Image: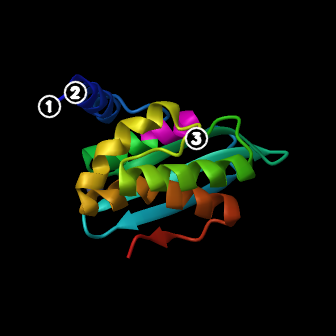
Amino acid sequence: MSELRELYQSVILDHNKSPRNRGELAGANRRAEGHNPLCGDHVIVMARVARDQIEAAAFDGRGCAISTASASLMTEAVRGRSAADLKQLFEDFHQLVTTGVAREDSELGKLEVFAGVHEFPLRVKCATLCWHALRAALEGGEPVSTE
Ligand code: ZN
């Protein structure tokens, strides 16, 4: 295993063990749930949105290490972003986890730790579940399923 891979792995394990922004979000005005029946992941994503900007995001629920770490890192990464920024970030993240390569000037930053997920196609749904739920939350809060 390369050093970079080990680093990526340790970030994911850390966020699984000590998830950031987990639990209720004060003043949340957007909320949606996501299910990934293939793995059993269940995530609830909450956001506080004002003037088209995500002021804060949080999540709750149960899932595997990848889905929990992804939700934890996502809630950190989307703070302060507009809906348009979020759409681009989600597209870039989706490309990363399906191809293992980030778009050249993407703003993924720490989210690049999920590059290795592309080697495990079933895990792509674990990594993207929270993103689908956040998008649904911003668009009106319909529950989403990866199936
Ligand atoms: Zn999973």
Please provide the residue range marked out in magenta. 72-77
Q: In which quarter of the image is residue 2?
A: top left
Residue 116 picture location, percent across and down: 29, 44
What's the distance in space between the residues labelled 3 and 2, CA to CA?
A: 22 Å
Q: How is the image coloured?
A: rainbow
For the question of whether residue 122 can be seen, the reply is yes
Identified by mark 2, the residue type is: Glu
Q: Mark 1 points at which residue?
A: 1
Q: Amino acid under label 3?
A: Ser
Asked if marks 2 and 1 touch (Cβ < 8 Å), the reply is yes
Which mark sits nearer the N-terminus, 2 or 1?
1
In this orientation, which residue lies closer to the viewer: 103 or 17?
A: 103
Provide the residue designation for mark 2. Answer: 6
Pointers 3 and 2 in contact (C-beta within 8 Å): no
At 34% across and 28% down in the image, what residue appears? 18
Q: Residue 58: x percent and y percent? A: 54, 41
Which residue carries the number 3 mark? 106
- Identified at 47% across, 44% down, the residue is 102
How packed mark 2 is, by other alpha carbons closer than 10 Å (few <14, some 14-19, many 20 or more), is few
Residue found at x 53% / y 39%:
75
How crowded is the residue under tag 3: few (<14 C-alpha within 10 Å), some, or many (20+)? some
Q: Is residue 22 left or right of residue 48?
A: left
Label the magenta part by its dominant secondary structure.
helix
Q: Does the residue labelled 2 lie within 8 Å of ligand 1?
A: no
Secondary element under disc 2, as helix, strand or loop, is: helix
Residue 122 drawn above or below residue 109: below
Q: Is mark 1 on a helix, strand or loop?
A: loop
Query: Along the polypeptide, which appears first: circle 3 or circle 1?
Result: 1
